[in-house]
Amino acid sequence: MKLKLNLFPVVPDMEEKMAEIIQKAVDGRASIVEIAYGTAADSVKKRILNFLNKKEIRQLYSRLEKTDKGWGRIYLHFRWK
């Protein structure tokens, strides 16, 4: 299962939305979560990455993949046992 979250245009409660989609992925045992932030500024990307690198969030996913060409996206990969 693949979940998607579009954060473009930038919303003020983006941390809450990311927490919700990650919790939904954990509950549903999703394999990938795609977070699209579009053509937003680098500060938005840093804000997203800082949230995803928090200790309690980092423990939930196995790998993070970033793409910067054109439409910015971050992929979170989950590994289930």
Image (spheres, rainbow, N blue to C red):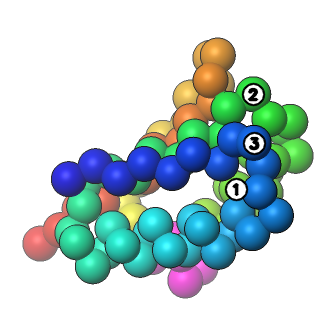
Q: Inspect this view and state whether residue 60 appears.
A: no
Q: Kindly give the residue lying farthest to the top in the view shown.
A: 70
Q: Position of residue 20 (x, y in %)?
A: 50, 74
Q: Which residues are magenta?
A: 53-60
Q: Secondary structure at mark 1?
A: helix
> In this figure, which residue is indicated by the disc labeled 2?
39
Left or right of 35, for residue 53: right
Q: Secondary structure at mark 2?
A: loop
> In this figure, which residue is indicated by the disc labeled 3?
9
Mark 3: amino acid: Pro
Q: Inspect this view and state whether residue 56 appears.
A: yes
For label 3, the crowd category at 10 Å Cα-Cα, with few meaning under 14, some 14 to 19 and many 20 or more, is few
N-term mark: 3 or 2: 3
N-term mark: 3 or 1: 3
Can residue 77 be found in the magenta stretch? no
Q: Are marks 1 and 2 in contact (CB under 8 Å)?
A: no
Q: Which mark is residue 56?
A: none
> In this figure, which residue is indicated by the disc labeled 1?
48
For label 2, the crowd category at 10 Å Cα-Cα, with few meaning under 14, some 14 to 19 and many 20 or more, is some
Q: Residue at x 55, y 83 (%)?
A: 56
